[in-house]
Image: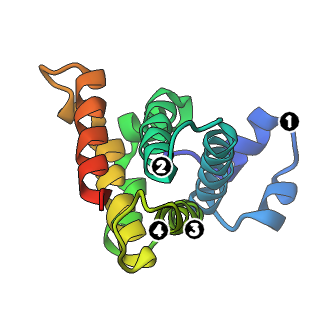
Amino acid sequence: MRRTTLTDVAKRAGVSRMTLYRRYPDVDHLVRALMTREFAALLAEVERSSGQGNAREQLVQRAVDAIRLLDANPLMRRVMQLDADLMLPYLTDRLGSTQRLVEQFLVAQIEAGHLDGSIRFGDAKTQARVVLLSTQSMVLSTRPATSGLEFTSLLDELARQLDGALKP
């Protein structure tokens, strides 16, 4: 992706270069916007899923579902395969807009768990950040992490760890 230019993208999309340059100063901004749109749509899909059980059980199931969806997402696969360092700023410098959306979702789920008694009491924002960082590492290291192991087994173990960490 680093070798791709906005001219290449405009030509392939059948739009003028100026149309793209008005919205995106460079390819990195375009790719970030695309990733935000794609991943926000995945999050919305996870949010719409009918979770069963208490708030903790729903949070754990939705976290695992989100990882499955991200693992199967063609854009995520392509980025991780060809240009994984595009993700580095979100690990070392700052949280991106999609990560903030996920964190808001997690805070709401955790607060619901505090109310129904299924999640141990604590600072919801801190608990949400720990869940975000735990699940994010699974998303970003799926390919090397699954070497010699079944992906579903790893997700099952993650679910058990999240459930245990959040239980009162």
Rounded to the nearest angstrom, the CA distance separating label 3 from label 2 is 12 Å
- Would you say the residues marked 2 and 1 are in contact, meaning their CB atoms lie under 8 Å apart? no
| Residue 61 placement: quadrant | top left
The residue labelled by disc 1 is: 14
Dot placed on the residue nearer the N-terminal end, 4 or 1? 1
Horizontal placement of 79 versus 81: left or right? Answer: right
Rounded to the nearest angstrom, the CA distance separating label 2 from label 4 is 12 Å
The residue labelled by disc 4 is: 114
> How would you rate the neighbour count of disc 1 (Cα within 10 Å): few for under 14, some for 14-19, many for 20 or more?
few
Rounded to the nearest angstrom, the CA distance separating label 4 from label 1 is 51 Å
Q: Mark 4 or mark 3, which is nearer to you? A: 4
- The amino acid marked with disc number 3 is Gln
Q: Secondary structure at mark 2?
A: helix
Q: Secondary structure at mark 3?
A: helix
Residue beneath the point at 58% across and 66% down: 108
How many numbered marks have been drawn onto this rendered protein structure?
A: 4
